[in-house]
Structure formats: structure tokens, C-alpha cells
Amino acid sequence: LPILNRFDDAVDASRAALAAKPNLAELRLNFAHALLRAKKTNDAALELRALAAERPRDPGLVLALARVELGRGNTNEAIAGFLAATSLQPDNAETHFQLGLLLDRAKQKAEAQRHYREALRLNPDSVRALNAVAWSLATCEDEALRGGPESVRLAERAAQLTGSANAIILD
């Protein structure tokens, strides 16, 4: 049903499946995803929160809830969720990168740089992480966090990895 963009029907079908097997976590997760697709984010957040309370060590579930909270504009809850996810999966470069973006937007520059750098340590060829660290070092208002030469070196590495095809990197 989601393929046909009949998201409300998908919610109804998921609800019916849950009536038959209310404790099956996979069905509850599918129900939450159906709610998200139907743009019922508050209901999806409630379902994901309940699931996360039952399975607090499930990094995929913790991340799903964090992303929902971000979509709802709850930045602090999203940051907390991403922090929890990085504790559960410390080697997930993408989660560190996304957390860095969130922290950067929240003006927590030192923590943002720390997570960008961790993403880069885990995935040294990540153009997005190279670019994020470079921009952060070049533009941070806090002089202690600024680093022009390192910023240029990282931006040049990102440019090299893209074959200098992305002009924004060296902007």
C-alpha cells in the first residue's frame, strides 16, 4: 500500500495486523513507519517511544525515534537520541556525522567538531565529514575551535576525493 501512496490504508492495515498480534515488535515498528508515511508524526513518536522503552538497546529504534523528534522540531530530544545511538553503536560514522550536524545547528560547536572528527576517523574518505570539519574550523566564532591551516588541508582532501567536481568544498 505505501508503494501506491495509500498511506492511510497502510495505517489501517497495520492497525488490523496489530489487533491480531499486539505484542509483535516488528508489526509495531511497521505501524510506526506507516504512521510516519501518513504524516502522523505525533502518533508515530508515541509508538516509537513505547517500543524504545521496551528495547532501549536497539540502535535502529533509538535512531528512528531521534529522527522523528528532529522532524517534529524537538532538537534537544533528537540530540539525546543521537547521543544514545552513538553509545550503542560507537563505530557508526553516519550517526556521528548526523549528530555533529545537529550539534552544530544547536551552536554546540566543540561537541559538533568532536562528532565530525569521530565520523572522519571512522570513515576517512567521507567527503561530507571532511567538508563539515573544514567549514567548522574555518568559520567557528570561538577562536579556540578555529583552525585555518587544518581547514584548508581537509577541504583540499575533500576536493581531491571528488576530483574537484564540487566547487562548494573549496569555497
Image (tube, helix red, strand yellow):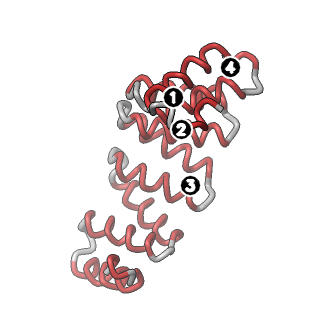
Q: Earlier in the sequence, mark 3 or mark 4?
A: 3
The disc at residue 166 is 2
Q: Could you say where residue 170 lies in the image, as x and y percent from the top left?
A: 61, 29
**In the visual, does 146 lie left or right of 74?**
right
Q: Kindly check if marks 2 and 1 are in contact, taking CB atoms under 8 A apart as contact.
A: yes
Please name the residue that numbered disc 3 is placed on.
70
Say above or below: 56 vs 17. Answer: above
Please name the residue that numbered disc 1 is placed on.
159
The local crowd at label 3, few if under 14, some if 14 to 19, many if 20 or more residues have their Cα within 10 Å, is: some
Q: Amino acid at mark 1?
A: Ala
Q: Earlier in the sequence, mark 3 or mark 1?
A: 3
Q: Kindly check if marks 2 and 3 are in contact, taking CB atoms under 8 A apart as contact.
A: no
Q: Earlier in the sequence, mark 2 or mark 1?
A: 1
The disc at residue 145 is 4
* Residue 92: quadrant of the picture: top left
* Residue found 64% across the figure and 29% down from its top: 136
Separation of residues labelled 2 and 4 (CA atoms) = 25 Å
* Residue found 38% across the figure and 26% down from its top: 122
Q: Kindly check if marks 4 and 1 are in contact, taking CB atoms under 8 A apart as contact.
A: no
Front-most of 162 and 17? 162
